[in-house]
Image: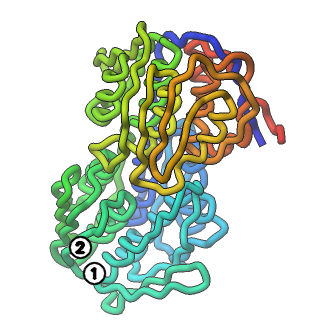
């Protein structure tokens, strides 16, 4: 199992390119199940989650090949629409095959999902929507079995109890081939949902309103293959924006769509960081001290939960106290004990962490517990005195393409230690 070693104290400077968005690529790859023929997806990040999903598509009789930032999927009929535990346990996003399979074949058997241990992430909203569309659902032995007695899903008005990104995406795909007009109310508004809608429409679907909380889908009889370049990863971009600010650096984050990061940009500016659009990217510069800023995570367009851990590290160096409240997941402060081992002063009460700024962090051996926590520990290591070793970084490889190479290109002293326990 790989570790990453960082020697702190280097100011980040230069240009860092942003890869394609994992959280857009995964549902889009699943949507390829809706149409036979050859799909081509470009600007796909080289990540373990992408490789896992290609394995799952191949298991479902597709021919998915991932090479040089491109995934080609030869869509073929699925003989057995079953997503087994052995594959789904590796990645929660595997559940996104459910909507396409049910829409296309009228049945599916999908293992209940796994992924990062950051709290309960049930799929009840997905299943409620499919039931309203005429599906019969059985939960047994760790699997969800879905059958559509009429063979084709029927349109419905589906009101989500809470906004859910994967639930919105699954039901968008299901509704694309349903009979009639489906309306999703209280839908997720994330840019990745908009991106999936763009791809579905390129495939011949009729999806309207993506990016708002009401999405309307007029079902069609069939869809066709698509050629599409995946949008930039806003969370990867945000991570490098925070890293640049943390090191009092001057970095051009290339390829980011700043409108997707308005909440983060506002908090960075409030903390004393210059955030300016420059060409097709955004320049991050910090020259003065950091100011403490309170943050509450919220569904898009609010402050993203996937940036909470990284921003918390930044606040460790801010003057005064900041409060960071996590409203999305109930178990997403697992990085706090590791940061405190490095000299941070963070107290957690329920869903709020109070961060008191310190003058310095100390390098230490720390354990990565989930994807974004891994990134936060690396950012901490960039400024810590001495050497930091982040262990069990397989989480990191699920969401960041070559992070150590990109940071090294900005001047960080960082290396990957292969196969170390």
Residue 118 sits in quarter = bottom right
Crowding around mark 1 (Cα neighbors within 10 Å: few <14, some 14 to 19, many 20+) is many
Task: Name the element at disc 1.
Answer: loop
Task: Confirm whether residue 79 shows in the render.
Answer: no
Marks 1 and 2 in Cβ contact (< 8 Å): yes
189 w.r.t. 75: above or below: above
215 w.r.t. 420: above or below: below
As rendered, which of 203 and 328 lies closer to the eye?
A: 328
Residue 27 sits in quarter = bottom left
45 w.r.t. 192: above or below: above
Left or right: residue 390 compared with residue 32: right
Task: Confirm whether residue 342 shows in the render.
Answer: yes
Q: Residue at x 43, y 17 (%)?
A: 290
As rendered, which of 23 and 290 lies closer to the eye?
A: 290
**Image quadrant in which the N terminus is located:** top right
Q: Which residue is drawn at 32% across and 50% down?
A: 299
- The image's mark for residue 133 is 1
As rendered, which of 119 and 325 lies closer to the eye?
A: 325
Task: Name the element at disc 2.
Answer: strand
Residue 379 sits in quarter = top right
Q: Which residue is drawn at 83% across and 38% down?
A: 420
Q: Which of marks 1 and 2 is in front?
A: 2
**Image quadrant in which the C terminus is located:** top right
- The image's mark for residue 324 is none
Residue topped by disc 2: 158
Image coordinates of residue 150 in percent, x first then y, are: 31, 91
10 w.r.t. 350: above or below: above
User: What distance separates the C-alpha of mark 1 from that of mark 2?
Assistant: 9 Å
N-term mark: 1 or 2: 1
């Amino acid at each position: 199992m790989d570790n990453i070693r960082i020697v702190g104290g280097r100011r980040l400077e230069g240009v860092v390119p942003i890869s394609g968005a994992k959280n857009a690529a995964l549902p889009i790859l699943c949507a390829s199940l809706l149409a036979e023929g050859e799909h081509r997806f470009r600007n796909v990040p080289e990540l373990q989650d992408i490789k896992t999903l290609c394995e799952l598509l191949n298991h479902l009789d597709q021919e998915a090949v991932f090479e040089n930032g491109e995934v080609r999927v030869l869509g073929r009929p699925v003989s057995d629409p079953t997503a087994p535990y052995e594959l789904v346990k590796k990645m929660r996003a595997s559940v996104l095959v459910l909507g396409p399979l049910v829409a296309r074949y009228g049945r599916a058997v999908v293992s209940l999902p796994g992924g990062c241990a950051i709290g309960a992430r049930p799929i009840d909203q997905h299943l409620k929507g499919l039931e309203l569309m005429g599906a019969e659902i059985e939960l047994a032995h760790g699997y969800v079995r879905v059958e559509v007695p009429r063979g084709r899903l029927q349109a419905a008005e589906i009101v989500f109890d809470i906004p859910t990104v994967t639930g919105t995406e699954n039901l968008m795909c299901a509704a694309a081939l349903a009979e009639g007009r489906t309306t999703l109310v209280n839908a997720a508004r994330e840019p990745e949902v908009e991106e999936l809608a763009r791809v579905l429409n390129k495939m011949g679907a009729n999806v309207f309103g993506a990016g708002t909380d009401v999405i309307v889908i007029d079902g069609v009889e069939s869809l066709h293959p698509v050629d599409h370049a995946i949008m930039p990863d806003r969370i990867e971009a945000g991570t490098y924006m925070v890293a640049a600010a943390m090191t009092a650096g001057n970095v051009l984050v290339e390829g980011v769509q700043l409108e997707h990061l308005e909440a983060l940009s506002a908090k960075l500016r409030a903390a004393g960081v210059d955030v300016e659009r420059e060409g097709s990217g955004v320049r991050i510069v910090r020259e003065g001290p950091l100011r403490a800023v309170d943050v509450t995570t919220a569904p898009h367009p609010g402050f993203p939960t996937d940036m909470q851990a990284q921003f918390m590290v930044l606040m460790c160096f801010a003057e005064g106290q900041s409060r960071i409240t996590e409203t999305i997941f109930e178990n997403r402060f697992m990085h706090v004990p590791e940061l405190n081992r490095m000299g941070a002063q963070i107290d957690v009460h329920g869903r709020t962490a109070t961060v008191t700024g310190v003058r310095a962090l100390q390098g230490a051996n720390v354990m990565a517990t989930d994807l974004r926590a891994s990134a936060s520990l690396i950012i901490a290591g960039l400024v810590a005195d001495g050497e930091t070793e982040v262990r069990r970084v397989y989480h990191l490889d699920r969401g960041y393409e070559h992070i150590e190479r990109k940071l090294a290109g900005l001047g960080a002293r960082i290396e990957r230690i292969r196969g170390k326990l």
